[in-house]
Amino acid sequence: MYEELRQNIERKITLTDEEWGLILEKTEFIKLKKNEFLQIQDSNNAYEGFILKGGFKTYILNENGTESVIFFSFENEWMCDLESFYYQKLTKYNIKAIEDSEILVINKSNKALLFKQVPKLIQFHILMVERANIAIQERLLDVLNKTSKQRYIEFVKKYPQKTQKINNKNLSSYLGVTHEFLSKIKRSF
């Protein structure tokens, strides 16, 4: 059960069946339909999650009511509102399913218990945080240094099978362009 998660963890550390059982005890399986929220901006429900199936967008709702998509996350990827999860602050982001999705989540108290029960998970955790920091840094550098066309090309290369599942509104928000400009970028290919 949930072999994708075990394989993801065991790429970095090995687990005994007993340790795996402890992990499963502390995680919660959540099924969301397209457009349902895992997390709502300014709430107290922060999770760290591993996506088994589907996809999500992480975004903020601006004062004028528009969305700014920060990240997309898909199968076999982790996602988390880091500050909210680790510092128990109100969430800064909405996390919404962009297709029917299944995810395993863990809250901070259960994760702390797991660290006591399976100390080698701390090593895995450090590697996860490093990857998250790198992803955030890459996203920031992309926005600052690359054209929207370059960002679109790289996104399509990274997620070729998912690009068609993301509507133009979400993709243009992620790229920071209008729908019309996104259409021009797509037509140029």
Image (cartoon, rainbow, N blue to C red):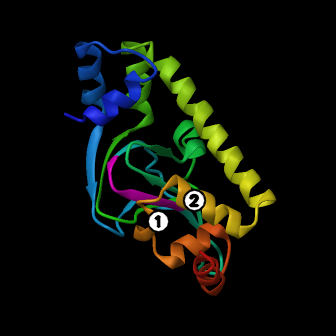
Q: Is residue 122 left or right of residue 26?
A: right
Residues drawn in magenta: 52-58
Q: Is residue 134 left or right of residue 10?
A: right
Residue at the spot x=32%, y=28% of the render?
6
Q: Quadrant of the C terminus?
A: bottom right
The residue beneath circle 1 is 163
Please say if 3 is above or below 164.
above
The residue beneath circle 2 is 155
Q: Quadrant of the N terminus?
A: top left
What type is the residue that disc 2 sits on? Phe
Out of 11 and 114, give the one closest to the viewer: 11
Secondary element at image label 1: helix
Q: Main secondary structure of the magenta part?
A: strand
Q: Return the x and y of residue 78 as percentages of the image width and height.
A: 45, 42
Out of 96 and 7, give the one closest to the viewer: 7
Q: CA distance from mark 1 to mark 2?
A: 8 Å
Q: Return the x and y of residue 161 as percentages of the image width and height.
A: 41, 60
What type is the residue that disc 1 sits on? Thr
Please say if 27 is above or below 147.
above
Asked if the magenta segment contains residue 55, the reply would be yes
Residue at the spot x=40%, y=26% of the render?
9
Residue at the spot x=56%, y=26% of the render?
127
Q: Return the x and y of residue 57 as percentages of the image width and height.
A: 48, 61
Residue at the spot x=69%, y=63% of the render?
150
